[in-house]
Amino acid sequence: MAMTAVAVPRRAVVFDLLLEVVAVVATAVAVREFLVSGEAFPWWLLLTIPVVGLISRFPLRLSGPAGKIEIGLDCAVLVFLAGQASGPAATLVWAICTVSVQMTVPKALSSRLFNTALCSLAGLVALQAMNAVDPMDASTPGELFAVAVGCAVYFTVDYVLTGVSLSLGSGTPLRQALWDSGVPLSLAAFLGVCSLGYVGTVLWRADPLALPLLAPPMLGILLAVRAFSRAHEDRARMRAMFEGARTLLAAGTEADILGATVEWASKVLICPGVTVAPASAPEPALSERLGHDGPLRWLVVPPRPSATVYDEDDVAALRAMAAVCSSALDRARLDLRMESLARHDPLTGLPNRAVFRERLTQTLALRGRDRRGLAVLFCDLDGFKGVNDSLGHEAGDELLIALAARLRSELRPGDGIARLGGDEFAVLMEEASGPDDVLAVGRRLLEAVRRPVRIRGREVALGASIGGVLGTGIEDVGELLRCSDVAMYSVKSSGKNDVALFSPEMLVHRIERVQLESDLSHALDRGQLRLHYQPLVCLATGQIEGFEALLRWEHPLRGLLAPGEFIDVAEETGAIEAIGTWVLGQAVTDGVEFCAAASRPLSMAVNVSGRQLGGHLLEQALSEVMGRCGDLSLVLELTESTLVSASTSVAVLERLRGQGVSVAVDDFGTGYSSIAYLRALPVDALKLDRFLVSDSDRDPRAAGVVSAVVQMAESLELDVIAEGLETAEQAAAMRALGCGLGQGYLFSRPVPAAQVPGLLARPVRVIEPAVMGGARLIA
């Protein structure tokens, strides 16, 4: 027999040594009895040693929870010895056979010593039992019964003592270590095979030459026993493999999977020392790689110190278990990644909107009606779209990552931040001391956004609109987020780049704005948009040289709205491109009619937003209208802030001018960086903002600024137009300073297209140049 054990504990070692001592003592007593009897030693019985060696290669294997128990069928030889010699002589011969065979088996020394002692002791007890039942000297039913008793005793001693050793070595309860559903059947097979030894005894008594006839049936039975043992072992292994795989696939976390794998492998390979290690195990241990990604880990099975080496079935089972574990680990990692993606923003790593709402819900539930100290900040980046449009989306992603890290670093330990989507972030404050505290945190976040970020060799600086709300009086999560969103939009509508706390008035304004957005989305289709025209006058001759098209919205409830009341809404919603296309087409249509009414060429100026300049509809619309302009000269007006902020303007403006239009810089003088761009920008005219014009007739310094701008424009071959002229003195001052064209209420307010022919038919009014402070309008 043989057993499987690992790193035998001291109690198991003590038991094995005790067993070996008992076996030695029992054998010594038997030898002494033989010597005292004076009986001659039956040397010819030593010929059974090869038979014992052969039979021992075909053990009956029983696999239990604690290890494998191998019971040798060489008890058949023991029965034969009992029928051929006296008890002491048979015991001595059996001990010699056991030592000769077991000590030469290729196993660990401890295993060989244990098996030798166990076989010797079991044989001695079995011989004593047989002799006690019947003297084993005549073929009688009593003798046959004695053989059955001796074989049962041998099986029991072998099985129980091996089970006790395994139980002590593995820590498995003795009852569990001995329990195996195949024990009754194995005992029956053991009795049947070992009874052949008694058949040999009977044949020897009748005719010793007939003994070889037992060889074929004995060999066949041994092969059948091997097949039975392997089938039993394979069935137990398959059952353990199936149950282990089912348990493993049901495990959730990596720790659960690894723990289940270790338990599974220990059960299948009957080796409690299985571990998961970061490195492959040295020989002669077995190991298999776990997982296809993640940390490098191996399933390690230590060597068997008191059992046979691992066979091919063990290696195949280990590989199968490692493969199932690897699949389970990959699935767990995938589930973990999917859960992380479902709960975190993949770009910045911040929690997403769902997680933020979940935390906010939990916080509200824990606080109950007491919402003091709770606040939410809603942050929307200002100017982020321009970065995407000018530098590309990859640069925009880099900017978001950098700003997300900055915002997180500005928060206090108890605060939480999430990316809600796009360029929107939300912050949860659970311990805000009051409105001032919320505003202070908001300003820190704003300053963090304002600090320039170097992206791809360029420094990019954005602003942010941040709205906050205190939790006091707020009922649920939706209301908290809605109020902070309303506060943020209030900041945007009042100039951006600031922080504000929610107030009920903001909600009213927001509702009105949402309604305005909805109405504006239908204004074009419902024919509510109008164009009014303001003339552009030559200050030297007083003649109308052209017009500027100014958009108006005939709102069904609010009346005629100027652009300042809805253009920003059109910009934010994207409706500006469709509206701009309509304005361009209508202005050209009306401008052609104005040229016909005046019987001379005129210009038509159309305002273009930055959103249009970055889109594709503007160039498409120009290509459609330029063919029907005739005597009409088309001018596109862009604010200097639009030209300065859009790095793609140069290429776009070159393409626009290539279609035959002129470009004018509107509201010139309101910015601070545009003068440096004028030399590079493909523009044709400057329209001086009313801020520069209003005091030029009274303030020498203001006049000096205008004079410098005019001289600069002349050096760049640019026309100069004065906007906002309201008095003859202002017009005279602009003419005296070298400004050629003027526009303002002095000449006409913006009028509908139907009134333009009347303006063209009016007498020419000439501005007489005069010294500052005195000018006349000559009819």
Image (tube, rainbow, N blue to C red):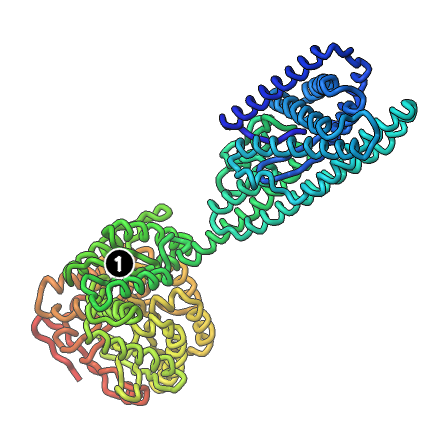
At horizontal 49% and vertical 51% (from top left) the residue drawn is 252
Res. 23 image quadrant: top right
Q: Residues within 10 Å of mark 1 (few under 14, many from 20)?
A: many
Q: Is residue 94 something one can see in this rendering? A: yes
Q: Position of residue 457 (x, y in %)?
A: 35, 46
What x and y, as percent, mark residue 359?
Answer: 32, 60
Let me know if residue 470 appears in the view: no
Q: Residue 503: where, in percent of width, then height?
A: 19, 72
649 lies left or right of 709: right
Element class at badge 1: strand
Q: Position of residue 185 (x, y in %)?
A: 72, 43
Q: Determine whether, in the image, residue 639 is placed left or right of residue 612.
A: left
- Which sits in the foreground, 445 or 21? 21
Compare residues 554 and 670 and report the one nearer the observer. 554
Figure check: 232 above or below 132? below
Which residue position is annotated with label 1? 463
Measured along the vertical axis of the image, is residue 761 above or below residue 697?
A: below
Query: Residue 161 lies in what quarter of the image?
Result: top right
Taking the image as shown, residue 710 lies to the left or right of residue 93, namely left
